[in-house]
Amino acid sequence: MGMSIQSEKADNEITPKQVGGDEKPHSRYAWYVLAILTGMYMFSFVDRQILSLLVPSIKRDLGVSDSQIGLLQGLAFALFYTFMGLPLGRTVDSCNRRNIIAVCITIWSFFTALCAVARSYFTLFLTRVGVGVGEAGLSPAAFSLIADYFPKERIGTAISVYYFGLFLGSSLALLVGGITVDALASTPFLTVPVLGTIASWRITFLIVGLPGLVFALLAFTVREPLRRNLMLLSDGRAAGTSFREAFVQMRLKWKSVLGTSVGMIFQSTCNYAVTMWAPTFFLRVHGWKAAQAGKALAVIMIVFACGGMYVGGILSDRWQKRGIADGPIRVAVISAVGIFLFLTPAALLSDVRWTLALMGVGMFLLSLPMGVAVAALQLIFPNQVRGQVAALFLFFLNLGGQTMGGWLPGFFNDYLFHNEHMIGTSISLTVGAASVLMLFVFLATMRPYRTHYRMMQDLQG
């Protein structure tokens, strides 16, 4: 069954309509759901970010290079998206989203704990691939739930709040991980039940992995909401959710999908280059301890990065309320300029106080579009394909941005500078190039996005 969205009537026309009349979810409960989802997303990034503080120990015990560490932090997650992201997106569009989230949390928590027993680079890489199930299953389901719980004029802000979890989780990992690493530094080996005697740094994976079962249980306090803005056939039946039908929808709006996805690949490259390698930068270049680096970066992420995401969501929503259809894309353009001006030079300065100041402002500006880019795609597609669109977006984001952001600084260190103490220059080179590309891509996306946004609004009436 083919699908098309056109202004002219057709015998087989499919149009998105509001299902459930004027009934709206209770706003207080909607915010409760958002808080739970944000906590889950936060926890997924605790599991993901913790590895950045263990770089010296992993390099020493497993004998790996900086570029291999970069692959552990980036490509290992992206591989799961390559094989499972789109099928999970389709499952989100047709099955109970709460149950999907609960299963995914259980799986990624298990694999995080399993990292503690990895005895080689290859086995550690495989366990990190397993951890990648977290965002692959969680975020498409969360985006779809948020779009059903919040009115369209609040989706940008709501998804930006959800994205707080990224930096709250990274901050918690840096704080707890930094303190744990320093505390265990004087005890190279520990004996634990079942596992026996293991290197003390491995305990960190157990500390952050096992509590995931609590969040898996919390998922069952979330009610599956009524699906809204469903595509309906002319006879009133809901359209299906096959890959072919989703592809037809995405092909109609491919310029917006591709432009937003590629633009955020470069934004994500900047983000991961900083968050994954900044702890190593402070340890190597400025001689900080893990706990000191963790505390400084946690403050930057909680205050500046979370603040930037919230301001970006508010700004986008206000623009769209005023009839400025490309509000999310404008936010991304501002972000790209700010990243280049403030975040690029941050790691090049010898005075660590100036580095922290520029990094704070730069992370605020970098974070502006992180929630609204997701909201931008949710707003131009009907309900049945939102999970698949989100999965495709996250596939691009992780395969491109997380892989390049995690790998490029290490690659430049190993093969361009041949000096691990040049990590600051490697970070700046990655961020500077990616921010320029991000700017050009989003400028080219503004016009097609305006067209596709208005197309969807006209069909919703």
Image (cartoon, grey):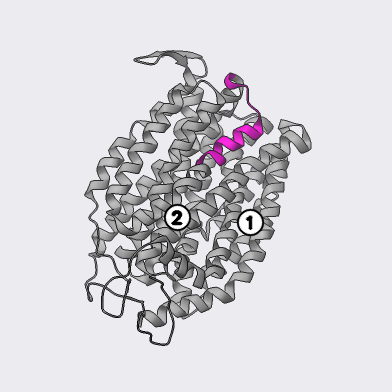
Labels 1 and 2 touching (C-beta < 8 A): no
Amino acid type, mark 1: Ile
Disc number for residue 418: none
Q: Nearer the viewer, residue 295 or 49?
A: 49
Q: Position of residue 374 (x, y in %)?
A: 46, 61
Amino acid type, mark 2: Ala
What crowding class fits label 2: few (fewer than 14 Cα within 10 Å), some (14-19), or many (20 or more)?
many
Residue 187 in view of the camera? no
Q: Is residue 324 left or right of residue 432?
A: left
Q: Note whether 443 is above or below 139 in the view shown.
A: below
Q: Where is residue 351 in the image (x, y as percent from the top left)?
A: 70, 41
- The residues bearing labels 1 and 2 have C-alpha atoms spaced at a distance of 26 Å
Q: Is residue 295 left or right of residue 285?
A: left
Which residue corresponds to the image point at 49% horizontal and 76% vertical from the top-left? 452
Q: Is mark 1 on a helix, strand or loop?
A: helix
Q: Quadrant of residue 192?
A: top left
Q: In which quarter of the image is residue 238?
A: bottom left
Query: Which residue is the site of mark 1?
Result: 339
Which residue corresponds to the image point at 55% horizontal and 38% vertical from the top-left? 73
